[in-house]
Amino acid sequence: MVVVFNKSGILTLPITPMGKIEGDIIIIPQEEIQSVTFKKGLLAYKMVVTTKDNEVPDFRVNKTMIGYGAQKKELGSLLEKYK
């Protein structure tokens, strides 16, 4: 799963380890987002996005990713932004 944050909102791409998109692409417009919270786990965080409709699934966000060294830095930025 790839989660993209930008000024328009949040976009999720359900990408498999083989690089294929399988599942639903979720687009959450900024004006519908009420809160974003992260709950710390042993190997990953659980990201909870609350919207007006509460129809967004929780996401597992890994603390590190093999082959993507910037994950730790980018996750740190998100954690700081959504304290």
Image (spheres, rainbow, N blue to C red):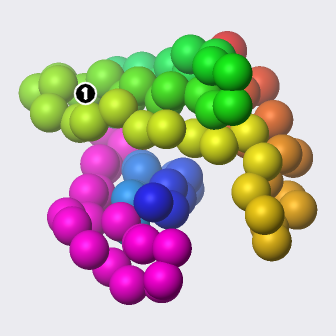
Q: Return the residue nearer the eye: 43 or 56.
A: 43
Q: Is residue 28 magenta?
A: yes
Kindly indicate the quadrant of the structure image that contains residue 34: top left
Q: Is residue 10 magenta?
A: no
Question: Which residue is pictured at 51% across the width and 19% down the height?
Answer: 37
Q: Which quarter of the figure is the N terminus placed in?
A: bottom left
Question: Which residue is pictured at 42% across the width and 38% down the height?
Answer: 59
Question: Which residue is pictured at 41% across the width and 25% down the height?
Answer: 48
Highlighted range, magenta: 14-31
Question: Which residue is pictured at 60% across the width and 28% down the height?
Answer: 45
Name the spot of residue 63 as percent of width and height, x first.
74, 39
Q: Amino acid at mark 1?
A: Thr
Kindly indicate the quadrant of the structure image that contains residue 38: top right
Dot 1: element: strand
Name the spot of residue 62 as percent of width and height, x first.
65, 43
Q: Is residue 51 left or right of residue 6?
A: left
Q: Is residue 7 above or below residue 51?
A: below
Name the spot of residue 23 as percent of width and height, x first.
21, 67
Determine which residue is flagged by label 1: 51
Kindly indicate the quadrant of the structure image that contains residue 49: top left
Q: Which quarter of the figure is the C terminus placed in?
A: top right
Q: Is residue 71 above or below residue 46?
A: below
- Kindly tell me whether residue 32 is visible in this rendering: no
Q: Is residue 11 left or right of residue 27?
A: right
- Kindly tell me whether residue 34 is visible in this rendering: yes
Q: Is residue 3 above or below residue 50?
A: below
